[in-house]
Image (cartoon, rainbow, N blue to C red):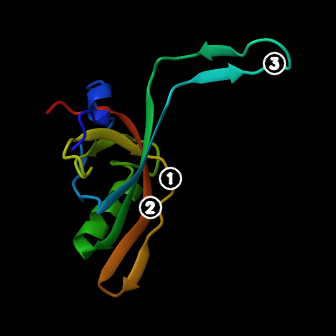
């Protein structure tokens, strides 16, 4: 475990929908953090740096390769149910990050899944926009 985690930099926030996606990712392959900043490099003179916002934007890509039918159904329901994630529209809790914390997220991708055999399901990559954290 790292000395610092993304959890340490996020505010406690409430989700749009008080539901929790509990399926644990087999792997979190990418964290991407940014802020609304612009760097202008003119032809002459020093570069100009502008911070437009201090709001931290974190995207996480998780892999769910081999799921049971129940796990696949939970993720699909969170994606497609208008009272839950509703594709990208609503935020919710996700307790399945590999660091053990619960985050407030929304999907940042379209729903797509694999059926490798009649009983093995998977989501090759699920992108989450991390909006904040749930207090431990």
Quadrant housing residue 38:
top right
Residue at the extreme bottom = 118
| Residue 13 seen in the figure | no
Q: Nearest the camera: 47 or 85?
A: 47
Q: Label 2, label 1: how many angstroms apart (C-alpha)? A: 9 Å
Q: Position of residue 65 (x, y in %)?
A: 35, 71
Secondary element under disc 1, as helix, strand or loop, is: loop
Q: How many marks?
A: 3
Q: Nearest the camera: 6 or 117?
A: 6
Q: Nearer the viewer, mark 2 or mark 1?
A: 2
The residue identified by callout 2 is 125
**Mark 3 or mark 2: whose residue is earlier in sequence:** 3
Secondary element under disc 2, as helix, strand or loop, is: strand
Q: Nearer the viewer, mark 3 or mark 2?
A: 3
Q: Residue at x 22, y 41 (%)?
A: 102
Q: Position of residue 72 (x, y in %)?
A: 31, 69
Q: Label 3, label 2: how many angstroms apart (C-alpha)? A: 38 Å
Q: Position of residue 24 (x, y in %)?
A: 24, 58
Vertical placement of 105 versus 125: above or below? above
Quadrant housing residue 42:
top right
The residue identified by callout 3 is 42
The residue identified by callout 1 is 109
Check contact, mark 1 vs mark 3: CB within 8 A: no
Q: Nearer the viewer, mark 1 or mark 3?
A: 3
Q: Residue at x 40, y 80 (%)?
A: 115
| Residue 93 seen in the figure | yes
**Mark 2 or mark 1: whose residue is earlier in sequence:** 1
Crowding at dot 2, Cα within 10 Å, few <14 / some 14-19 / many 20+, comes out as many
Check contact, mark 2 vs mark 1: CB within 8 A: yes
Secondary element under disc 3, as helix, strand or loop, is: loop
Q: Position of residue 34 (x, y in %)?
A: 50, 31
């Amino acid at each position: 475990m790292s000395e610092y985690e993304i959890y340490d930099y996020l505010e406690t926030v409430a989700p749009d929908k008080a539901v929790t996606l509990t399926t644990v990712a087999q792997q979190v392959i990418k964290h991407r953090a940014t802020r609304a900043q612009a760097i202008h490099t003119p032809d002459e003179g020093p570069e100009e740096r502008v911070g437009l916002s201090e709001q931290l934007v974190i995207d996480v890509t998780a892999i769910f390769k081999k799921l049971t039918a129940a796990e696949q159904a939970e993720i699909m329901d969170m994606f497609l149910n208008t009272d839950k994630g509703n594709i990208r529209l609503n935020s919710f809790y996700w307790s399945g990050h590999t660091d053990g914390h619960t985050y407030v997220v929304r999907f940042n991708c379209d729903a797509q899944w694999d059926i490798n055999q009649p009983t093995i399901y998977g989501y090759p990559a699920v992108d989450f926009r991390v909006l904040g954290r749930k207090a431990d």
